[in-house]
Amino acid sequence: MKIGLNTDGFGAFGLDECLDKVAALGLSCVEFGVGGWSSAPHLKVEALLTSASERDRLLGKLRDRALEISALNCSGNQLHPGRIGPEDTDLAYKTLELAKLLGVRRVVMMSGLPGAPGDSHPNWITSSWPLEAMEILEWQWSERVIPWWKRFASKAETDGIRLCVEQHGRQVVYNTESFFRLRDAVGPVVGVNFDPSHLIWMGGDPVSAIQALGECIYHVHGKDSRIEPASKVNGLLDPKHVIPVHSRYWNFVSLGHGSSVRAWLDIVRALRAAGYDDVISIENEDYSMAAEDAVATSAATLRFCIQQSTEEAA
C-alpha cells in the first residue's frame, strides 16, 4: 500500500512548496482538487487542458520528487438545480479530459444532490416521513441521478477512467446501499472512494462497510471523525460550521484522534482482505491543529498500520 495526500490539505502553500512537503513526509502520491468544493489551490484546469507545456511542467515537478498522481478530485454538485449544476457538470467532463491527458486513471467525486421538483436548492432526504419524502427521493433518482450518471459514466468508460464516488452525508449516495443503487444502474465504471470519516459520524462501522463493498473500492481517503460529548445530548446531525470545533457534536480529525490506532489497523487489514492494495490518500480537515502537524500525524498512523499489516501477511 502507498500513502498519498489530497493537496487541499496543504492549500496554504504554493505547488512547489506543497510537493516538497509531501516528499519530505515520505509520501508517494498526490490527489489534486480541481474545482467544485475545492478552491483548486495547485492546478488550473483550463491552463492544463490547453497547454502541453503546462502539463509537462507539472509532470516534471512530480517526477523530480518521485511522486505520482493517484486521482483528480472534482467533487461538487453537478445535480444542483441552479447554476451550480451546469458549472460542476462542465468541470466534471473537463476533469475526465484532463485525467486522460495526464495519464491519470481515477477521478474522485461525489454523487451530487438534486432538489425536489421545482426547487431551487438541493434537498437531502433522510427519512420516509413525511409521506412526500419518498416521492421526492424516487423522483430524484429516476429523473436526475440515474440519467446524469449514465451519460457521464459512458464517457468515463470510453476514456478508460474509473469514477470513485465518495459516500458523503448530504449527497444522494451517502452509504453502501445508496452506492449500490447507483452502481447497479450505471455499471462497474463506478466504484467507491472509501472515506471512513463520513460513515463514522453517521454511526456506521468502516470494517463492515469495506467487507460489503469489496472489489468496488477504487480509491481510499485517510480521514477520521471524532464523536464529541455534546452528541450524547443532541445526537449526530449537526448543521453548525466546522469552525469553531469545540461547539460541534462531531469533528473531522487526523487519523488516530477519533478512532484508535488499532481501529485504523483493522481498517487497513480489511482493505487488504478485500483486495485493495493501493493508495490511501490523506484528506486533512482537522481544524484543531496545524495542517503540517495533522498530516504528519495521519501519515505516521498509516505508516505503522501498513507496516504491521504487511508483516502479518508475510
Image (cartoon, rainbow, N blue to C red):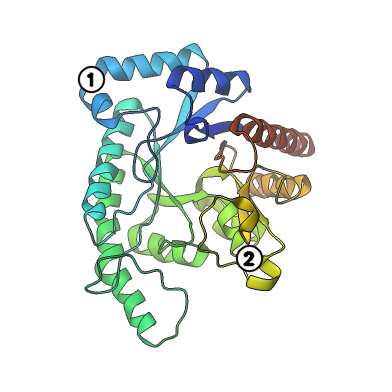
Circle 1 packing at 10 Å, graded few (<14), some (14-19), many (20+), is: few
Helix, strand or loop at mark 1? loop
Locate residue 224, reporting x and y percent.
Answer: 63, 48
Q: Label 1 to label 2, Cα distance in Å?
A: 46 Å
Cβ atoms at labels 1 and 2 below 8 Å apart? no
236 to 305, vertically: above or below: below
Q: Quadrant of residue 159?
A: top left
89 to 180, vertically: above or below: above
State the residue at coordinates (39%, 62%).
182
State the residue at coordinates (50%, 52%).
216
Q: Nearer the viewer, residue 232 or 102?
A: 232
Q: Quadrant of residue 300?
A: top right
The residue beneath circle 2 is 203
Question: Which sits earlier in the primary sequence, circle 1 or circle 2?
Answer: 1
Q: Amino acid at mark 2?
A: Gly
Locate residue 211, reporting x and y percent.
Answer: 62, 57
Q: Residue furthest bottom?
A: 131
Q: Is residue 273 left or right of residue 45?
A: right
Locate residue 79, reporting x and y percent.
Answer: 29, 59
Q: Nearer the viewer, residue 109 or 294?
A: 294
The residue beneath circle 1 is 51
Helix, strand or loop at mark 2? loop
231 to 28, vertically: above or below: below
Quarter of the figure with the C terminus: top right
Q: Nearer the viewer, residue 221 or 84?
A: 84
Q: Amino acid at mark 1?
A: Ser
